[in-house]
Amino acid sequence: MPKVLEFKLPDLGEGLTEAEIVRWLVAVGDVVAIDQPVVEVETAKAMVEVPCPYGGVVTARFGEEGTELPVGAPLLTVAVGAPEAPEAADAESSEYSGNVLVGYGTGEAVRRRRRVRPAPVGATPATASSASPVASAPGSARPAAPTASAPAPAAPASLGEGPVPVISPLVRKLARENGVDLRALTGSGPDGLILRGDVESALRTAAQPVTAAAATVPVAAGSAAAGTRIPLRGIRGAVADKLARSRSEIPDATCWVDADATELMAARAAMNAVGGPKISVLALLARICTAALDRYPELNSTVDSAAREIVRLPAVHLGFAAQTERGLVVPVVRDAQARSAASLSEEFTRLTEAARAGTLTPGDLTGGTFTLNNYGVFGVDGSTPIINHPEAAMLGVGRIVPKPWVHQGELAVRQVVQLSLTFDHRVCDGGTAGGFLRYVADCVEQPAVLLRSL
C-alpha cells in the first residue's frame, strides 16, 4: 500500500510566518521527484520556489493561487511507495530529500523505493479523512485531506471551548488588538484554518454595518466603498510596515546639494573605453559612498532604542532601490567597502536581474546598513526619501542633466546632479551629515579626490 505524506508550508527563515500562493507548479496526479519545486510563493521578503522533500504522486493540493497560508499549513499530499510500473522494477532511490527544510529534518535513511505510476487526474486519494493542520507535526504521515476539487468543509461558526484553528501569531495579535473573537469566525483556510483575511473581513464588517434599508441605496460614485481595494500583503505589505515604522520611530532630517558631475561622467567613459565589463554610474556613486562612510562612520550605524545605544557597524552592506513589477525592493550588496567599482557594477547587475525575475532570496533583501537610492532613473531631480529602517541614512541621487553652471569663472553647460542625504538625527548632527554630503559632492565633481582614500 502507498503511504500518503503531507507536505506543509515550511519555515522559510527570516522570521516569516506566512506566504501567498502565487503559482502552482504541479497538479493533482502529477509525479514529483524529491526536491522538485511544487509551488511558487510570495513572502514579505521575496518570491520563493518551494521544493517538496518527498517523491511520489500528488494526491491533493491545498489553497488556490492568491491564497495566503501560514507556516505549518498543508500545501499538498504525496503518495509514496505506490506499486511500480513493470519497466521500473530496478529503480532505487530515497523517499526523502537529503536537503533540510526548516521543520522537516533530513528524513529517514536511504532505502529502496519503487517508482510510482501517476494516478488519474481528479481521482480520489488513497484515503479521504481530513486532519487538522494544527495538530500534526511537519513531515508526519497521515491520511490525505480533500483535494482541491473537493474543498475541505468549513469550520463551524462557533467553536465553543475547543482549540481555535489559528497557526499564525500575527493573526492572533491582529484579532487581540482589535477585540475580534476568533471563536466566532469561520476560517477560509484548509480545514477551517483562520487566516489574516478572515480577521480583516470581520473588522470591515464591524466597521461598516449594513441595514436592510441601506442595502437598497445605490453607492454614490467616487465614494470610498466604490473604490478598488488592494490588500497590503506580501512584499508590498512588508514595505508599507517598514516605511510606517521608519516615519514613526526615526527623527529624520534631509540636506541636499547640486554637484557638477561632468568630470565623473568623463572618468566613467575613460574607464569603459579600455575594455572589460562596463562600469555603471551607480557603481561609481557606491564606491564614493563607501569612502565617505569610512570618513563618517556615524552614518553606517543603527539605533538600539531599548538599550538607548548607537551601534556603529564594521562593514558596509549597501542597499540600493530597484523597481520591479511587484513593487520597490532593496537588494543588498555585502561588504561593499571591500569591492572595486567593477565588482560593485557586476553585483548591481546580478541583483537587479534577480529582482526583476523575482528570484531574490530573503538573504538578498536583508541586513543592509546604508541605502543608495537612484531616483534619477524616474526622470526627477530631487526627493526626501524615507530611511530604510533600521538603518541611519540614505543617499538620494537625481537625474544627471545639462544645466547652466559657473565653471572656472565662466557660464557653461555642465552635467549637473542633485544629491540628497536623509539621516537619523539621533546618530549625528547636521555638521556630520553636511560633511558627508559635501565629501560625496567633491568626489562627484573631482573624481581625483577619491584617489586619496583608495
Image: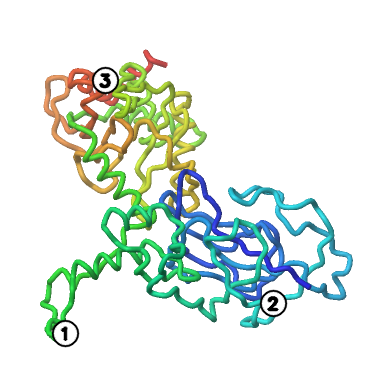
In-image side of 283 versus 215 (left or right) = right
Q: Is residue 162 above or below residue 265?
A: below
Q: Pointer 1: what residue?
A: 212
Q: Which label was assigned to residue 439?
A: 3
Q: Position of residue 269 (x, y in %)?
A: 38, 32
Q: Secondary structure at mark 3?
A: helix
Q: Out of 197 and 93, give the one closest to the viewer.
A: 197
Task: Locate residue 95: give its quadrant.
Answer: bottom right
Going by the numbered disc 3, the residue's amino acid type is Tyr
* Picture quarter with the C terminus: top left
Q: Nearer the viewer, residue 280 or 164?
A: 164
Among the 4 quarters of the image, the one containing residue 396: top left
Q: Residue at x 87, y 75 (%)?
A: 86
Residue 416 seen anywhere in this rendered image of the structure: no
Q: Earlier in the sequence, mark 2 or mark 3?
A: 2
Q: CA distance from mark 2 to mark 3?
A: 70 Å
The residue indicated by pointer 2 is 126
At x 27% / y 44%, what residue is drawn? 243
Residue nearest the viewer, comparing 387 with 417: 387
Q: Residues within 10 Å of mark 3 (few under 14, many from 20)?
A: many
- Residues under numbered marks 2 and 1 in contact, where contact means CB atoms less than 8 Å apart: no
Is residue 388 or residue 279 the one in the foreground? Answer: 388
Q: Is residue 195 above or below residue 426?
A: below
Residue farthest to the front?
Answer: 161
Marks 2, 3: nearer the viewer: 2
- In this view, the residue farthest toward the top is 452
Find the distance from the CA under tag 3 to the CA under tag 1: 67 Å
